Image (cartoon, grey):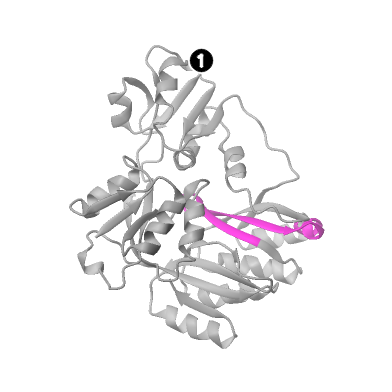
Amino acid sequence: MQVAWLKMWTYTHDVYLWLWAPWTYVPQNWNTDTIRFLRENRAVWLLPKLNVYWGPVEEVMWNVWKIREAIMLWYFPLKIKHVLAWNQNWSIEELLEIRAHPQALMQCSLWLKEIWANPEELFSEAYKTPNLYESSQIILEIEDKPWSLSNSLEVFSRNGINLLYLHSTPYDRNKYRFYILIDESDLDKVNSETLRDELLSVWWSIVWNNLSGLWTEKIILTKTKTNVDWIPDAKINPSIWVICSKETALKQWLRIYKDPFCPPDNETHFSVVSTMKNDVTKEFKWLVKDKIMWLLTLPDKTWALSSALKIISESWLSLSFIMSLANNMWWFDFPLVMDNSNAIFWIQKNIIKLGWNLRVL
């Protein structure tokens, strides 16, 4: 069996060592290489499922859903540990910039705020939604509870607001953020006290929209391809610090400011995506099988998504991920990761009754 991923010596590589150390590992340099490799070979691929941030992951996820023969074989949870490190000869008063992979920056957001960095600005740039004509982005925060999303989207439907784009990401313990595009003409409705009160009644809160300014702080956060790209710069520049593993910091003779620099319960869930024709799950070790990936196809109607999610909520299933993909002028695809349950087949039957489609990926 061949296992494909973009880079060696990353947390994804650690997952590979846990799962398939005796098997062939094929590192890929570019996203297009990975997609081509999956299309041309019967292989498996490791994909961070719950840490879907700016960079190659989102682009690759977008493409893998277009590979119709690809399926998600469950996932593997891996504890993530980060430290904040710098050259032993410098002092904290000289800190002006922290460099790390976007995932590491988001995972360490709580401690970044304590040292006067501003991860919110980073996230705003990270989730820059498609640049559509006369559209506006809003960011909503919701607790991770069944019915929360469907009830909230009903609020938009009742007020005649049609969503142009939707993308979810885990933000904090038991919270998700949803990055949404709406038509500019609907912005006044979203900003009205009536609609905001309705959203708050179903556990939503509006974080900001693109008309409100973001505060700036002293420390700059810089995204890098890996957590170790800029360690040489940190060694010679007193203003640059890095987020990396404790092992890397000690190996590079860096001083550790805080260990750990992210919440102790932090973990990434790595999906195992396969283009193999046969079911090979019996060969896998330590896989968690409580989630499954589906593709929901809906018409471009104001009430369509809220109605479909209401059917899902009636079975008390929880979504781990949702993102809208334009299919054509009148239809949208929504890749979903949700609980694996026999109720899904009841959900599928009721979705199809409405003339829509829900199929396993």
Q: Which residue is mark 1?
A: 93
Residue 214 located within the stretch drawn in magenta: no
Q: Position of residue 304 (x, y in %)?
A: 64, 75
Q: Position of residue 224 (x, y in %)?
A: 48, 35
**In which quadrant of the rendered view does residue 263 lie?**
top left
Q: Which residues are magenta?
A: 165-190
What crowding class fits label 1: few (fewer than 14 Cα within 10 Å), some (14-19), or many (20 or more)? Answer: few
* Placement of the N terminus among the 4 image quadrants: bottom left
**In which quadrant of the rendered view does residue 225 lie?**
top left
Q: In the drawing, does residue 335 fall left or right of residue 307? A: left
Residue at image point 32% right, 60% down? 44
Q: In the drawing, does residue 119 fall left or right of residue 191? A: left
Q: Nearer the viewer, residue 61 or 1?
A: 1
Q: Is residue 105 visible?
A: yes
Q: Secondary structure at mark 1?
A: helix
Label 1 amino acid?
Answer: Glu
Residue 183 located within the stretch drawn in magenta: yes
The single residue placed furthest to the bottom in the displayed view is: 353
Q: Nearer the viewer, residue 182 or 148?
A: 182
The single residue placed furthest to the left in the displayed view is: 22
